[in-house]
Image (tube, rainbow, N blue to C red):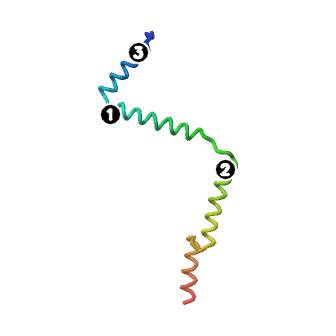
Amino acid sequence: MKTTPVSLTEYHAQVDAYARKNPTRSLLIAAGTGLAVGFAIYALQTSSPTARIGHLIGGLQGRLHKLGNGTGFVRRKMKRVRGFLLS
């Protein structure tokens, strides 16, 4: 398959003509490309192991705090059972 070289000005003219003929499709293509590039950049950013461990420990501490303060599901159920048995 043989391709013919296209100059940059010809390519620009073709893209411009396409965008003028199909504005909605061009807008959707641009938005999709922007989202894909943004997601790729976000996915390629790596956090340090220290930050990941800190996030994990913070989540565990929050859950343990909820259980200890009586706001956890098991603690609330135990209070209801205890109250029912004492009545």
Disc 3: which residue:
9
Q: Position of residue 69 (x, y in %)?
A: 61, 73
> CA gap, disc 3 to disc 1?
24 Å
Crowding near the residue tagged with mark 2, few <14, some 14–19, many ≥20 C-alpha atoms within 10 Å = few
Q: Is residue 27 left or right of residue 44?
A: left
Work out whether residue 42 or residue 84 is closer to the camera in this orientation and state it: 42
Q: Which residue is pictured at 33% across the width and 22% down the height?
A: 17
Q: Amino acid at mark 3?
A: Thr
Work out whether residue 8 or residue 81 is closer to the camera in this orientation and state it: 8
> CA gap, disc 2 to disc 1?
42 Å
Disc 1: which residue:
24
Dot 3: what SS?
helix
Q: Earlier in the sequence, mark 2 or mark 1?
A: 1
Residue 29 placement: quadrant = top left
Crowding near the residue tagged with mark 3, few <14, some 14–19, many ≥20 C-alpha atoms within 10 Å = few
Disc 2: which residue:
51
Residue 87 placement: quadrant = bottom right
Dot 2: what SS?
helix
Q: Which residue is pictured at 41% across the width and 15% down the height?
A: 9
* Proximity of marks 3 and 1: CB atoms separated by less than 8 Å: no
Q: Earlier in the sequence, mark 3 or mark 1?
A: 3
Crowding near the residue tagged with mark 1, few <14, some 14–19, many ≥20 C-alpha atoms within 10 Å = few
